[in-house]
Image (cartoon, grey):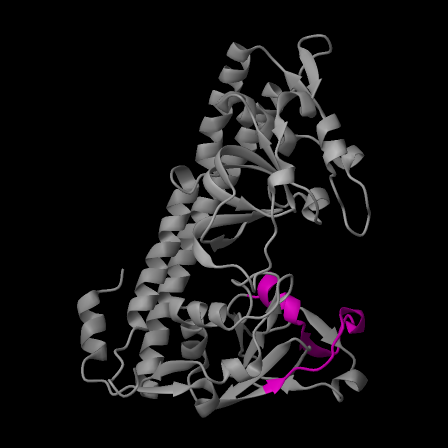
Amino acid sequence: MINPNYIEKLLEGVEVEWKSLGQIGEFVRGSGLQKSDFTESGVGCIHYGQIYTFYGNFAYETKSFVSQTLATKLRKAQKGDLIIATTSENIEDVCKPLVWLGEAEVCVSGETYIFKHNQNPKYLAYYLQTPMFFEYKKQNRTGTKVIRVHGDKLEKFKLPIPPLEVQKEIVRILDAFTELTAELTAELTAELTARQKQYEYYRDRLLTFEEGEIDWKPLGELAENLDSMRKPVTSGVREFGDIPYYGASGIVDYVKDYIFEGDFLLISEDGANLVARNTPIAFSASGKIWVNNHAHVLKFKTYEDRRFVEFYLNYIDLTPYISGAAQPKLNQKNLNSIMVPNPLPIQKKRIVSILDKFDALTSSITEGLPREIELRKKQYEYYRNMLLSFPKSEVEA
């Protein structure tokens, strides 16, 4: 735990200047490095996609390499530089900073900026993870499928710049707290993995039926399809609000208005996740919601009917119903034809009750182990934000 009194004493009387990133450093665009350029050894390189799929906040070694010949043509980051991914498919990942701490120069791909500066690099990286920066990049993003923040916008972002010795102490505290949080999270994650295996065992048994044991029906007979009511709205036109805006894999934004109200089952209509299944392709949504044309909308008569189908669709292999290789798609006709077991209401209620309990333990962020992991994350973010909160003067504000 971080003592708030110590934080208050640390920051007491500290003179802080608010400066833009453009005032404290220089943005240099990365080069056109492709994944096909990777070699088994050579000069270290970092591809922009790896920044949010492989690396954490800091790196001393690279996952990939390029030849010496190609390296001479590419732009490079030096020790202490920030490597910032400028494009992503979501607002959370875009502009994720990676501090390069290796002794040797490292080649950097396009779709990144190398930020060269004279501040503590870890201090800058920690600050670029705060809600203050998140709001800034959200307001200055462009694009819909591929979200981008341009360098001229990044240059204008203002942040507090305390003396270097204060930056160093803030980094020391956050490094220690990051390590402690990681250890606690690793323990909880190991326990969660064990629970998930237990859940899968019971799920497999509960959702496997002998031939002739129960009736089977096409999904189209079990639910009302409301796809015709869906309405996509591009990000540039959406009015921000508190209504969830759903896409193929869940909530992608929040808007002011809604087109559905009630309890629904949303099912991915397209996207690579239909094949990869990294996240559930069927997910419940309740209350006031907006849904674009990348998720089917189904309405059921009872809670048990909806949840049973949700568990079942996330359990079975849907490959026979998916068309398209480059762009996998589960069209409405194929969706309606999926054969689903339809046990008696009392049996269905029992199955859903058991699976709901396991789901709460392994998936819910409001209870069980996922909640504990989320609390550790929130606790870390609270202290990080407290350490990095400095008052603005009237002139700076």
Give the quadrant of residue 37: bottom right
Q: Is residue 216 among what the camera can see?
A: yes
Give the quadrant of residue 233: bottom right
Identify which residue is drawn at 68% across, 86% down.
Answer: 75
Identify which residue is drawn at 48% across, 59% down.
Answer: 239
Q: Is residue 223 left or right of residue 80?
A: right
Along the viewing direction, whichever of 67 and 272 lies nearer the viewer: 272
* Residue 301 percent location from the top left of the image: 53, 21
Judge whether residue 155 is colored magenta: no
Q: Is residue 195 left or right of residue 338?
A: left
Q: Is residue 335 left or right of residue 130?
A: right
Q: Is residue 302 above or below residue 328?
A: above
Span colored in magenta:
28-55
- Quadrant in which the C terminus is drawn: bottom left
Q: Is residue 34 above or below residue 274?
A: below
Q: Is residue 121 above or below residue 95?
A: below
View extreme (top): residue: 212
- Quadrant in which the N terminus is drawn: bottom left
* Residue 81 percent location from the top left of the image: 53, 83
Identify which residue is drawn at 65% across, 46% down.
Answer: 293
Judge whether residue 35 is colored magenta: yes
